[in-house]
Image (cartoon, rainbow, N blue to C red):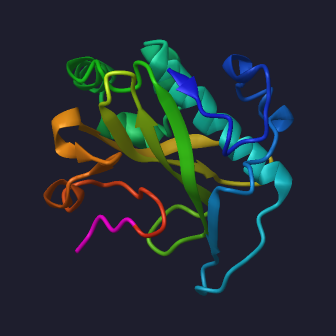
Amino acid sequence: MAIDLRPWLPFAALALVGSTAAAQVPPLGPGVERVATGPDGAPFNVGAADESAAMGRFAAYTMALAKRDYASAYAMLRLSFQAANPRLEWEMNLRKRAVLWADGTLRVLRVSWYADPAGQPPGLYAAFDFRGDRSDRTMHCGYVVVHRTAPDAEWTVVRTDTSEVPPELIEDGVPKADVLRQLPCYLGKGIATAF
C-alpha cells in the first residue's frame, strides 16, 4: 500500500514515522479539507505541531496495517479500545479482511478536529477520513480517529472503521448510489454517503 502524497506535502521517510518521528512529519496539503470544532461548537485553529503529530500517528498506524504488523498497530490503540477489543479477536477480524490496507493508494480527504467533545475523555481528537484505491479497482474507505489527552501526551488510535467496495459496485470511480448509503465514509465534497 502506498500513501498518496498529493494531499500531503512530500516526505521521504513515511515508513519511519512513529511516535518519536511524528514531529518531523510535514503538515497535510492544502487540498485536504479541515474542520475544527471546540467544546462550545465554535471553530478553533489547530497548530502545525498538533497536525503533524496526529498525522504521524495516523500514518504509522495505517502503514503498520499495510505491513501486517498487527502487534505495532495494536500497541497504538488507546487502552480502553484494547480492553473492548482483545488482541486475538481484533487481529482475527483484520485477517478475515485481508484485502484491506494491502495495496493501492491511500488518500486523506478530510481531517476533523474536536477539542474536549461531550461524553468523551478530555483532549484533542483528529478524525482522518480516507479513501484507498487498489490496482484491482477495488476501493476501501473509512476513518481513523486519534486522540491526545494533553499537549505532551502521545496520540493513540481510539476508533476506526473501514469498508471495502468491489469494482462491480463502482461507477466512474464512485460507489453506486445504493452502496453509498451503507458506507461509513466521507468521499469528498459533492459525494453524499447519506441520502
Q: Is residue 123 visible?
A: no
Q: Is residue 48 left or right of residue 192?
A: right
Q: Which residues are magenta?
A: 191-195
Type of secondary structure dominating the magenta stretch: loop
In the rendered image, residue 156 lying in the magenta stretch gets the answer no
Asked whether, in this view, residue 84 is left or right of residue 51, the answer is: left
Image spot of residue 90 (x, y percent): 29, 26
Q: Nearer the viewer, residue 59 or 124?
A: 59
Residue 7's image quarter? top right
Q: Is residue 52 above or below residue 20?
A: below
Residue plotted at (72% across, 17% down): 16
Does any portion of residue 24 appear in the rendered image?
yes
- Where does residue 46 sit, x and y in percent of width and height? 77, 64
Taking 186 as reference, is 36 left or right?
right
Quadrant showing the C terminus: bottom left
Residue 59 horizontal side relative to residue 159, left or right: right
Q: Residue at x 62, y 62 (%)?
A: 33
At x 39%, y 22%, the residue is 135
Q: Residue at x 71, y 42 (%)?
A: 8
> What percent of the width, then of the height, locates residue 24?
86, 33
Which of the pair 140/146 is nearer the observer? 140
**How many numbered marks appear?**
0
